[in-house]
Each structure stands twice: as C-alpha cells, then as structure tokens.
Image: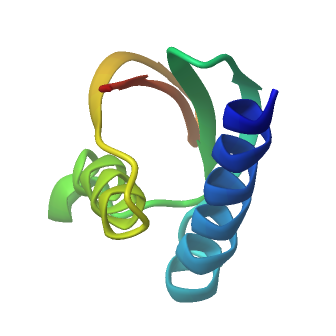
C-alpha cells in the first residue's frame, strides 16, 4: 500500500510540474495507475510539427528526476489528446 501511495505522490507532483511548464499548450492528468504502469492523458493544442512525442519524453524525464524509472509503452492518439501508458521499471 505504501508503494502505491508513494507512486501516486510522485505522479501527482510530476503532473503539477509538467503542467506548470507546458500549459496551456499541453496538460496532463492521471487516467489510471497500478504498481506496474500508469496511464496519463495529454491534452492541448500541442506543437505537432515541433515534436508531438517530445511531450511524452519530457514527462518520462520528470518521473526519472523524482526517482521513478519508466518506459513509454502504448500511445493512443485522438483529436488534441493522447493517452500514454508508462511501464514502471523496478
């Protein structure tokens, strides 16, 4: 239980930091989480020509700076949004 609580704190802090620097062009929110993966929704106008996927990498880097190693798994794209699954590495 403590692992999930710690994981949720890291995710919430990362969401806040990401949104602080990328909003309104890109915003994130938690969709779901387990001890093995997290799903984050990215919404906004994005800069598709500048590197749409860079936003996902930026989020992953912020996670790593907080001590959580993850890799980008599945990416589901929609109109002005994407839901990205980050697989948590032990």
Quadrant in which the N terminus is drawn: top right
The extreme front residue here reads 2
Q: Where residue 81 appears, x then y in whole percent?
A: 58, 38
**Res 19 visible:** yes
Please name the colour scheme applied to the rendered image. rainbow
User: Relative to 58, does residue 23 appear above or below in the rendering?
Assistant: below
**Res 28 visible:** no
User: Relative to 42, does residue 20 appear above or below in the rendering?
Assistant: below
User: Relative to 40, does residue 22 appear above or below in the rendering?
Assistant: below
Q: Where residue 54 appears, x then y in whole percent?
A: 23, 56
User: For residue 4, which quarter of the picture?
Assistant: top right
Q: Nearer the viewer, residue 44 or 83?
A: 83
Which residue corresponds to the image point at 79% horizontal and 42% vertical from the top-left?
5
Which residue corresponds to the image point at 31% horizontal and 58% vertical from the top-left?
64
Query: Does residue 72 appear left or right of residue 68 in this picture?
Result: left
Q: Nearer the viewer, residue 26 or 79?
A: 26
Q: Where residue 50 appears, x then y in whole percent?
A: 17, 65
Q: Nearer the viewer, residue 62 or 3?
A: 3
User: For residue 79, which quarter of the picture?
Assistant: top right
Which residue corresponds to the image point at 60% horizontal and 19% vertical from the top-left?
35
Query: Does residue 74 appear left or right of residue 57 in this picture?
Result: right
Which residue corresponds to the image point at 28% horizontal and 28% vertical from the top-left?
72
Q: Where residue 31 appears, x then y in whole percent?
A: 76, 29
**Number of marks in the image?**
0
The extreme left residue here reads 50
């Amino acid at each position: 239980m403590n692992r999930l609580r710690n994981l949720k704190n890291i995710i919430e802090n990362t969401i806040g930091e990401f949104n602080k620097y990328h909003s309104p062009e890109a915003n994130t929110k938690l969709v779901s989480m387990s001890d093995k993966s997290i799903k984050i929704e990215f919404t906004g106008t994005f800069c598709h020509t500048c590197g749409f996927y860079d936003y996902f990498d930026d989020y992953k880097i912020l996670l790593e700076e907080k001590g959580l190693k993850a890799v980008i798994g599945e990416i589901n794209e929609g109109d002005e949004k994407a839901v990205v699954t980050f697989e948590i590495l032990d």
